[in-house]
Image (spheres, rainbow, N blue to C red):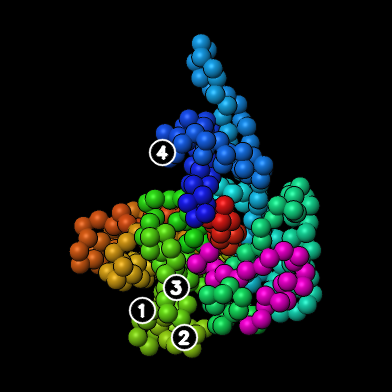
Amino acid sequence: MELRKINRSNIYHEFMSHNSLTKQDLVFKLNLSLPTITKNIDELLADKLIEKSGSQGNTGGRRATTYSLIRDARIALGIDVTRNHITIAALDLTGTIITFRRYRLSFQSTDLYFQSVGKTLEAFIRDNHLDESRILGVGIGLPALVDADRRHVFFSKILPIQENILEDFKKYIPYRVDLFNDAKAAAFAETWGNPNFKNMFYLMLANNIGGSIIINHTIYSGDNQESSEAGHIQLVPGGRLCYCGQRGCVDTYISATVLSDLTDGNLEAFFQELRNGDPKLVEEWNTYLDHLAATVNTIHVLLDCNIVLGGYVGEYMGPYIDDLQARVVKLSTFCDNADFLKLCSYKKEAIAAGAAMRFIADFTDSV
Ligand SMILES: [Zn+2]
């Protein structure tokens, strides 16, 4: 029984990583008998998880049927909740984003807010013609610490999020709903299917600083789900007051608001004026990069792995990455380059995508 499950799972995963396969391809790749392959293909066809996609072979011989994954046999949804917006993303079984959209919706711990989220999601599903019967679940990324059971929030000082917020969402979302810490969701999106990010630290440079440690493609959450909170490493003893109540935390020096506060809350305007050479902003940016370099160096000394810069500032970091790497090298004890410092590949949709991906991983593991 167990072996049958393993064979089915292995065959299904071959379809996930190849566009199309013949039965013979699978016989060679998995070293299984043709009857075993045939039986499993018939089952996967019956379950509508794969489909016949064509044929291949030389013109003289018999052509072999090819089969392919039905990528949207199931879909997963993710919602990123921030102070003033929600972002919704829909993903297929390969983890590819089918579509995503950002909506202006200010967070409030009121029934009206949760109702608005439900209605917005409903409209998103309808407008994008998503088949409700294929929806695996809705992952919600929050700027809060979430229990391992994905059902309870146990620390939230950024937004007034109640411990039992899951029940509030579920009143208006008729699917399975799971909660995720925002940075951990975004990190999961970056590590998904990316062999280069087997081990990494994801540093989320959003309006608050988040982090996540990935070891062997798995999130390391710590004994109490409190790991990776790089935002509360003390950078300057006795320094600026942090929302956590301590002083001098990293969060107060490298969050996106440190920059956007200089241009009326508009981060894009900050980078525009920086490019235009505004001397005050150039000076502030240099200070910011030094603080960021110090943070990156601290993380790298401890973890010795790739560090991915995400969040709002991560989106703009492209033209400045060489400069930042040079600053990190100056602080480093061991490194003569900082190639381990990488730009994120997901941008505004990272948290929503990562929150959805968990459902895909669980589903594809269960086939
Ligand atoms: Zn703090």
Residue drawn at point x = 70 percent, y = 60 percent: 103
Amino acid bearing label 1: Leu
For the residues labelled 2 and 3, the Cα–Cα distance comes to 26 Å
Which amino acid, by three-letter code, is at mark 3? Answer: Ser
Q: Amino acid at mark 2?
A: Leu
Residue 338's disc is: none
Task: Tell me: residue 54, above or below residue 326.
Answer: above
Which circle, 1 or 4, is nearer the viewer?
Answer: 4
According to the picture, the residue beneath numbered tag 4 turns out to be: 31
Kindly indicate whether the residue at mark 3 contacts the one at mark 2 (C-beta within 8 angstroms).
Answer: no
Q: How far apart are labels 3 and 1 at the CA level?
A: 23 Å
Q: Residue at x 79, y 75 (%)?
A: 112
Which is nearer the eye, 354 or 12?
12
Per the rendering, the mark at residue 221 is 3
Check residue 79 for magenta coloring.
Answer: no
Point out residue 155 in the picture as x, y percentages from the top left corner: 55, 82
Q: Which range of residues does the magenta coloring cover?
A: 163-185
The yes-or-no answer for disc 4 within 8 Å of ligand 1 is no
Disc nearer the start of the sequence (1/4): 4
Of badges 2 and 3, the one in the foreground is 3
Q: From what the image shows, is residue 87 above or below residue 149?
A: above
Question: Is residue 161 toward the left or the right of residue 260 in the image?
Answer: right
SS for callout 3: loop
Total numbered badges shown on the rendered structure: 4
Do labels 3 and 4 touch, CB within 8 Å?
A: no
Q: Position of residue 280 (x, y in %)?
A: 44, 66
